[in-house]
Image (cartoon, helix red, strand yellow):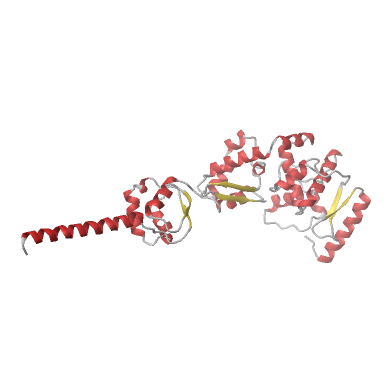
Amino acid sequence: MNKKKLILLIVGLLLLTGGFFAYNTYNKIYAPNTIKEGYIHIKTNSTLADLENEIRPFLKRVQPFIWVANQKKYNSNIRAGKFKIPKGISNNDLINLLRSGKQTPVKLVFNNQHSLEKLAGRIALQIEADSTSILNAMLNTAFLSKNKFSKKTALGMYVPNSYELYWNTSATQFRDRMLKEYHRFWNQKRIEKARALKLTRTQVISLASIVQKETAKVAERPIVAGLYLNRIKRRIPLQADPTIIYALKEKHGQDFTVKRVLNKDLKIDSPYNTYIHKGVPPSLIAMPDISSIDAVLFPSKHNYIYMCASVDKIGYHAFASTLRQHNRNAAKYHQWMNKQGINR
């Protein structure tokens, strides 16, 4: 082989090698590499190795993704959050998406949790923060003092609803967001209604929690709320069985089961015993939802001051304006309870 042919061969090989290298590099960067659509959750302070384990199920080839990530120095700028991975995008587009921090918000939902501990556990299932850090943020003494809550009343700050926020929201960010939502909920109209009833927000929520426990029927709640407000106006004790059950559980533990309130229970020494103490209890006994709070603020107008579980319409109540009528309703209900064999 003469010198000229050798040079041409070498040049050809170089061009072929360079072309292959360029093609391979182009494919690593720009060829589609995601095989399905879905979501990944990148934890705070994640490393590239952590991300690799999370994103592996979405990739056709993992190593090209890692190579592009290193070339774009993504390993020094990994942002936490929930991200939607589209199907059929390149490593370059994927890294740009993750690096941009453009998360998909989560819809956080909670309803009638009975304690801050249970609420913290419910929230921890939906965002990155764990239940311990959430509970600690909720019970932070400086926060409670600044915003005029106590450990007993703090649960009333959390208005059950669905909220849009980011998955990597911290415990304190969640708590502070809920404070803003609480103030947003207590708009001028609701504040004026509470004032007209001569009740504070804490008292409205406390009374709403009793309404919540008394009936699961949303349509019945304004009637029940109106009944309790009639009692407050007449300075008659609320005599609400849910407060007795709450007092019993405080005394014996939350796992204490009460299906029937007995006469001896009505003598329990507790500020939540509404058979002994007049007015609204010092704090809520459970988390009321918006329908119960608004039932107190916008109650039905009537003359009822007595109520008893109905045996004719299970799940509802029989209301009465006189003690005679109430005694008839109560006797009917107790007979039904005895037939069911419900003693405690």
**Residue 60 placement, left or right of 38:** left
- The residue depicted at 53 percent of the width and 50 percent of the height is 127
Residue toward you, 250 or 166: 166
- Provide residue 85's location: percent of width, then percent of height: 46, 55
Of residues 48 and 33, which is closer to you in this image?
Answer: 33
**Coordinates of residue 149 in the picture (x, y in percent):** 65, 38
Horizontal side, residue 109 vs residue 197: left or right? left
Q: Which of these two is toward me, 107 or 10?
A: 10
- Position of 311 compared to 270: left or right? right
- Tell which of 319 and 253 is nearer to you: 319
Specify the quadrant of the image occupied by residue 299: top right
Q: Looking at the figure, which quarter contains the C terminus?
A: bottom right
- Residue 155's spot in the image, x, y percent? 65, 44
Is residue 215 visible in this depiction of the protein? yes
Q: Residue at coordinates 76% horizontally, 58% vertically from top-left?
A: 259
Q: Left or right: 161 with respect to 57?
A: right
Could one spot residue 139 in this view of the protein? no
Residue at horizontal 87 percent and vertical 45 percent from the top: 302
Q: Quadrant of the N terminus?
A: bottom left
- The residue positioned farthest toward the left in the image shown: 2
Q: How many marks?
A: 0
**At x 87% / y 62%, what residue is drawn?**
335
